[in-house]
Amino acid sequence: MIYVLSGLQCLLNICGDYAAEHEITFNCNKTIGVFFAVYKQPVPSNVFLNGVRVQFFDQLKYLGVWINASLKDDDDIQRQVKSLYFAANKLRGTFDQCSPAVKTLNFVPITCQCMLVNCGANTLVNCGARNNLH
């Protein structure tokens, strides 16, 4: 682990020197690290960028997806499933008092179009195909 940390520090020093030479500023408060390890290791505490200590965390959000140190996305999938259940229950509660005819009128065109677009047959979406579903 010592070689990895010294190599990381060397790379961060190169980035810092390049930034100083080209008048680029790194926001050291937003720079974080995740230590990926097969076995439980102590979190490195002596890695610096421009003299500011880099904080290491067990997980981070990158492009809307939570990534953790064990490279498992179970927590993020569980979060997405909860969000989907919440949205579906909200939608169900909103249209719970509607008649079946209104529900069909509102949701059949949307679901038909989504299914056909997802299978690549979006040219088949027309009034006749929608009317056959009623």
Image (spheres, helix red, strand yellow):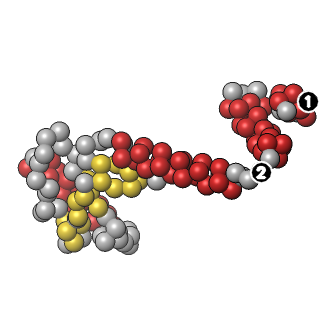
Q: Residues within 10 Å of mark 1 (few under 14, many from 20)?
A: few
Front one among 62 and 117: 117
Q: Tell me the tag on residue 93.
A: none
In this picture, residue 132 sits left or right of residue 25: right
Front one among 45 and 70: 70
Rendered position, 13 above or below 110: below
Label 1 residue SS: helix
Residue 3 seen by the camera: no
For badge 1, the amino acid type reads Gly
Query: Quarter of the image holding residue 117?
Result: top right
Q: Position of residue 48 (x, y in %)?
A: 19, 65
Q: Position of residue 11 (x, y in %)?
A: 23, 55
Determine which residue is flagged by label 2: 98
Give the mark toward the camera: 1 or 2. 2
Rendered position, 134 above or below 105: above
Residue sitting farthest toward the right: 128
Chain-order first, disc 1 or disc 2: 2
For badge 2, the amino acid type reads Cys
In this picture, residue 40 sits left or right of residue 29: left
Q: Residue at x 12, y 63 (%)?
A: 46
Q: Residue at x 38, y 70 (%)?
A: 24
Q: Residue at x 71, y 32 (%)?
A: 115
Q: Residue at x 13, y 45 (%)?
A: 40
Query: Quarter of the image holding residue 18?
Result: bottom left
Query: Quarter of the image holding residue 30?
Result: bottom left
Label 2 residue SS: loop
Determine which residue is flagged by label 1: 128
